[in-house]
Every structure is written in C-alpha cells, then in structure tokens.
Amino acid sequence: MVSGVALCAALLSSIGAFEARAETISGALAKAYGFSPDLGQQRAATRAADEGVSKAAGAFRPTVTSTITGGFANTTTTNPISKTGPHLNYNTYPRSYNVVVTQTLFNGGRAANGVRQAESTVMQSRETLRLSELNILNAAAAAYMNVLRDTALLRLSDSNIEVLQQQLKQTNDRFQVGEVTRTDVAQAQAALAQGQASAFTARSNLNNSLGIYRQLIGEPPRNLSPARAIEGLLPKSMDQAISISQSEHPQVQAALHAVDVAALNVKVQEGALYPTVSVQGNLSEVQDSNATPKANVFAASAIGSLSIPLYDGGVTYANVRQAKEQLGQARLQADLARETVRSGVVSAWGAYLNTKASIQSFQAQVRANEVALAGIREEAKVGQRTTLDVLNAQQALLNSRTSLISAQRDQVVNSYALLASVGQLSAAKLGLGVTGYDPTVHFDQVKDKAWGLRTPDGR
C-alpha cells in the first residue's frame, strides 16, 4: 500500500505530467511580474507623478507670452464747407506684436517647497508601486499553489470514487450470498454518491483556480512543478520580522512620505503670506498706429514688481490651518500603517508556524488512518465490522489526506505571505531573473525637462 505522505506528494506533482517542460513557481512569478496590468498601470501612475517635479520646477522658470495682431482699415474724410473737396480716402494695415517675459524672483519659498513636495510625492508613488509588486507576487504564488492543490484534490476525489465503486461492488456481491443486508448496500451507494458530489465540487474549485491563475500569470498553467516554502529568505524570529517591517514595508514608507508631502504643503501655504518679487520685460511694436500710414511706435521696458499681501478675507490663514490639520492626519495615518503592518507580521508568522506543525500532525494522521482502514477491512471480511465501519474509515482517510494536501499548500503560500508582510517580497529578493523596472530612469529623463510634448518612450 502506498503511504499517505507519498500519495499526497505524488498528487501535488502530477498536474500536467505529459507536458514536455515543467513550469516552476519562480517562472510563473516572473511571468506575472512582466504581464500584470495592475503593475503596469501603477508604473504609469509613478511616471505621471514624476512630471509633478517638472511642473513644480516651472515656478523657477520665466513665462513668455506673445501677442500678434493685424488687420485692414479704410479712412475717408470730407470737407464740410466745400462739397467739391478736398477729399481723403486711404487704406492702412495696422499691425503689432508684443512680447512679455515675466520672471519671479521671490515668492515666499513656495517654488522651492513645491519642488520638494513634488519629489516627496514621487517617493510615495514609488512605494505604492513596490506595494503593488509585493501584492501581485503574493497573489500569483497563491494562485500557483491553488492550482496544484485543487488538481491534487480532484485526483484524490476521483481515486476515492474508484475505491467506493469497488466497495459497492463487493457489498452487492456479499448481499447476493446473504452475508450483508440491503442496508449495507444502501450505505455503500450513499457513500459513492457523496464521493461523486465531492468530485464535482473539487472540479469546480479547480476551474476557479485555473481562471485566477490565468488572470494573474497571463497564460493557463502547464505542467506545474511542486514548490517549496522560501524558508531561507524569511527572518529568523518574529521580533526581527517586526523590526524589518517597520523600516522596509512599502505601506509604512508610503505613509511616511505622505507626512513629508503634508508638511511641505504647510510651508507652501504659509508662503502666500510673504511678498512676491518679480521682474517683467516688455517689447512691442505697432505699425500704422491709429490708422495713420507709416505711424510706427516701438517700445521696450523692464519693470520690477513687489506685491505685498495684506488681507484676502482670511482665505490664506484658513489654508494654512487646514494644511496643519492635514499634516496631523497624515502623521496619524503613518502610525496606523505601522500598527497595521505589525499586526500583519504577527498574523503571518503564526500562520506559517502553524502550517509547519500541522503538516507533521496530518502526516501522522494519514498513516494511522491507513492502518485503521486496512484493519477494518480485514475485520469486515470475517464479520467483525460492518460496511458502515469500512466506509467511515475510508472517509476518515480521505479527510486526512485532503487536510495534508491543503497544509502542504498552505506552508508554501504562508511563507510567501510572511515575506510579503515584512515588505521584502520582490522580484529581486526572489531572484526571478527578470529585468526589474527602475523608476529612477524616467524620473531623471523628465525632472528638468522644460519643453517638449513627447514622453521619453516616444508617445
């Protein structure tokens, strides 16, 4: 008789056994990293945030506007005394251009603080991108193991149906010779019907897992190889895991950058209370001025301006107070993020340790149920056990094997979940062998870009 542990291992590794090449969990995660539309849209969001720095830096740059006019004018004059003349009738073409250059020299630090605020927003967006990567890889690992588990459970259900069909045949044969009653036959039939219903449920669960796998990985599963827990990448203790999470988890880091954004917003709003110093250059020319032929006017000027805010109805003061309250809210959200992450680490650590211990218990349970079933079958042959006893023992063995398969799946999934709760689950940490997305490349391309409509990728 094949042991329960060996049977479960065989079932977990049997999916797609006839395919030419096996798919590993690392390969599946690499595909998810490259395929995920969710990860792609968050990368786009990060690139959009990069442009905020260039926009904020525009406050340091001059603004240039130009106005050009042109037209036609007809002028006719008559002599009110003499109807015969003199009369004047002439055409002119008045036209002009005007160029204005304005440069802000000082605006209460709003320009500098605005750039720093935009840079903090970029850092926050990068942490959100890292959180998306973490979540995608965690979900993809679960999807991979769910397909393995549900395939194994379906095959276990099919194997159970074969055993129950044999049990029903043996019960019918014994009923024909009067060794058992009609009740025994009905019990065997009921057990077979229950097994068939369980197989239908197992197939439905597998179809659902296949759909989720395709959604996350980008292609249907083919010949999935067994996977192991990533124990070597995990922290050595729960205290170490908590410590790492508080400094490295992207949810915490994003919240801290949000605090920086809010703090700089206070400075930006306070800057509206300071004077604004600017200089404006103006260059203009008007030809055929006032509809007078060849009456040209040329002008050039450079004017400095000092604008001192005195009172705006209290709007600026309200903006400052509002920004300070938003800063307080951001700090509280950062505290909440720390506690949320800490709770997640504790939960993930406990779940991982529980699955490791559970596997040993379920392995022992499977072995014990195998011995019990074999003994009950022998006792039933000599009339010391009923058909119901055999069916109950068979169901107990099936339940323990099902629990073992689920626990083996949980151990792998929980190891990835634990690394995710710490904030270290990434393509680089897992060594997936993919070209990682570097958000600094786009940032460096656009942060000082003062003109141009095309994005760095040519759109």
Image: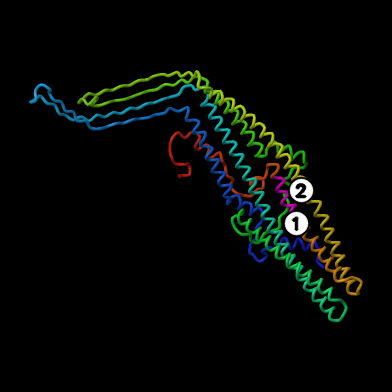
Q: Amino acid at mark 1?
A: Ser
What segment is highlighted magenta in the picture? 406-419
Q: Where 45 falls versus 205 (above or below)?
A: above
Residue underneath mark 1: 406
Main SS of the magenta part reads helix
Q: Amino acid at mark 2?
A: Tyr
Cα distance in 3D space between marks 1 and 2: 13 Å
Indicate left or right for 280 with 146 as reference. Answer: left
Please name the residue shown 67% across and 52% down the image: 141
Q: Are marks 1 and 2 in contact (CB under 8 Å)?
A: no
**Position of residue 134 measured from the top left corner of the image (x, y, whole percent):** 65, 45
Nearer-the-camera pick, 47 or 311: 311
Quadrant housing residue 3: bottom right
- Residue 352's tag is 2
Quadrant housing the C terminus: top left
Indicate left or right for 136 with 393 as reference. Answer: left
Number of numbered discs: 2
Residue 297 belongs to magenta span: no
Q: Where 344 falls versus 87 (above or below)?
A: below
- Residue 98's tag is none
Pointer 1: residues within 10 angstroms few (<14), some, or many (20+)? many
**Position of residue 435 measured from the top left corner of the image (x, y, whole percent):** 58, 47
Q: Where 157 falls versus 108 (above or below)?
A: below
From this viewpoint, which residue is outermost toward the left?
84
Nearer-the-camera pick, 156 or 306: 306
Indicate left or right for 291 with 271 as reference. Answer: left
Please name the residue shown 59% across and 31% down the image: 261
